[in-house]
Amino acid sequence: MAEAGPLSSEDLQLLESSPLPSLERHHLRLLAHALRCLQQIAGRRAGALPARQQLQAWLADQPQLTAEPAFQKAFGQQMEKAAKQLEQIAATLARDPLGLELSDLCHWADTQARSRLRPPG
């Protein structure tokens, strides 16, 4: 059976196995979804993120989005925000954004959660 979205069942299992609270796991899933979409748009899993024009062309080519222009616009804005966050994560790991693995995102999210739980000092 073909995958229904950009995340495989293995991807989802990895994300769901995170000990993060449900809201943070949800954010992690959104980032992972954006990463896989951006990799799909670029046609590669290495290098820089696709240009905004590539993203816009991809959005315009998605049949499920063409009937909903307002959603298409909002989804594009969310993808751009996720792309910026992925660039920041990649920079902290000295990697290129499309080269990020889901395990990198899980590690980053776990580190973020632990830093919030540390007492100030």
Image (cartoon, rainbow, N blue to C red):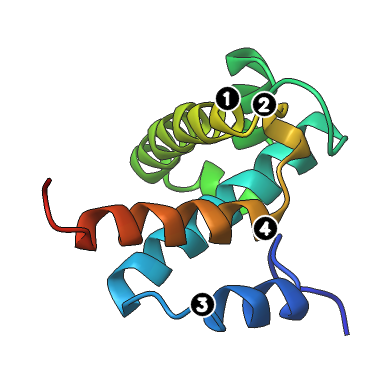
Secondary structure of the residue carrying tag 4 is helix
- Discs 4/1, front: 1
Identified by mark 3, the residue type is: Ser
Q: Residue at x 57, y 47 (%)?
A: 34
Question: Residue 25: x, y in percent?
Answer: 41, 70
Residue 29 lies, with reference to residue 13, above or below; the image says: above
**Residue 45 found in image quarter:** top right
Identified by mark 2, the residue type is: Ala
Q: Where does label 3 land, which residue?
A: 18
Q: Residue at x 71, y 29 (%)?
A: 95
Query: In the image, 70: left or right of 6?
Result: left
Secondary structure of the residue carrying tag 1 is helix
Q: Earlier in the sequence, mark 1 or mark 3?
A: 3
What distance separates the C-alpha of mark 2 from that of mark 3?
23 Å
Identified by mark 4, the residue type is: Leu
Q: Earlier in the sequence, mark 2 or mark 3?
A: 3
Can you tell which mark lies on residue 102? 4
Choose between 24 and 92: the one closer to the eye.
92
Secondary structure of the residue carrying tag 2 is loop
Q: Are marks 1 and 3 in contact (CB under 8 Å)?
A: no
Q: Where does label 2 land, which residue?
A: 94
Q: Earlier in the sequence, mark 3 or mark 4?
A: 3
Is residue 60 visible to us here?
yes
How packed is label 3: few (under 14 Cα within 10 Å), some, or many (20 or more)?
some
Question: Residue 90: x, y in percent?
Answer: 61, 32
Q: Where does label 1 land, which residue?
A: 91
The C terminus - image quarter:
top left
Q: Residue at x 84, y 31 (%)?
A: 46
Query: In the image, 113: left or right of 54?
Result: left
What distance separates the C-alpha of mark 2 from that of mark 1?
5 Å
